[in-house]
Image (cartoon, rainbow, N blue to C red):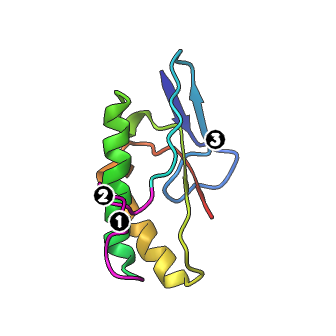
Amino acid sequence: MIEKFSPRTVHEPAGYSHVTISTSGRLAHLAGQCPLDLSGAVVGEPGDYAAQTEQVIANCLAVLEAAGSNPAEVVRSVIYVVSADSAILAAVWRQLNASVLARPSPPPARCWA
């Protein structure tokens, strides 16, 4: 069982929950969800953040399914974008939030780096 919420005593978050509590007996940690296709090649041209984000989303969904899970059961996600350009970061954030990966309501705790 997973409980996600944001207390009324702190600011309203934009696209994440302040608190996620997992009381289940099984916990999976995913790692390495990079913009690599099945052959291990980076998708898209250099700087094609949209194609690379789409591949990361597909990889996350595939790994969750293989673990017998789904986006609604994600406790926390950490997202790394190799760019300091705020327009690129905003575009990647919007693309992720529009994807099935981010559909659970409320969404899990999230961190950008």
Residue 29 left/right relative to 39: right
Name the spot of residue 8 as percent of width and height, x first: 63, 44
**Could you say where residue 76 lies in the image, as x and y percent from the top left?**
55, 43
Residue type, mark 2 in image: Ser
Residue 92 x, y percent position in the rendering: 43, 70
- Horizontal relation, residue 85 to residue 94: left or right: right
Looking at the image, residue 25 sits to the left or right of residue 9; the answer is left
> The residue under label 1 is which amino acid type?
Ala
Residue, disc 3: 7
- For residue 40, say whether it is visible: yes
Q: Would you say the magenta stretch is mainly helix, strand or loop?
A: loop
Rendered residue at 39%/76% (across/down): 49
Asked which secondary structure carries label 2, the reply is loop
Would you call the spot at circle 2 few (<14 residues within 10 Å), some (14-19), or many (20 or more)? few
Q: Is residue 38 above or below residue 1?
A: below
- Image depth: mark 3 or mark 2 in front: 2
Q: Mark 1 points at which residue?
A: 41
Mark positioned earlier in the residue sequence (3 or 2)? 3
Q: Residue furthest top?
A: 25
Residue carrying label 2: 39
Three-letter code for the amino acid on which mark 3 is drawn: Pro
Secondary structure beneath label 1: loop
Q: Considering depth in this image, is 7 or 112 the residue closer to the camera?
A: 112
Q: Are marks 2 and 1 in contact (CB under 8 Å)?
A: yes
Dividing the picture into quadrants, the one containing residue 13 is bottom right
**Does the magenta run of residues contain 38?**
yes
SS at mark 3 in the image: loop
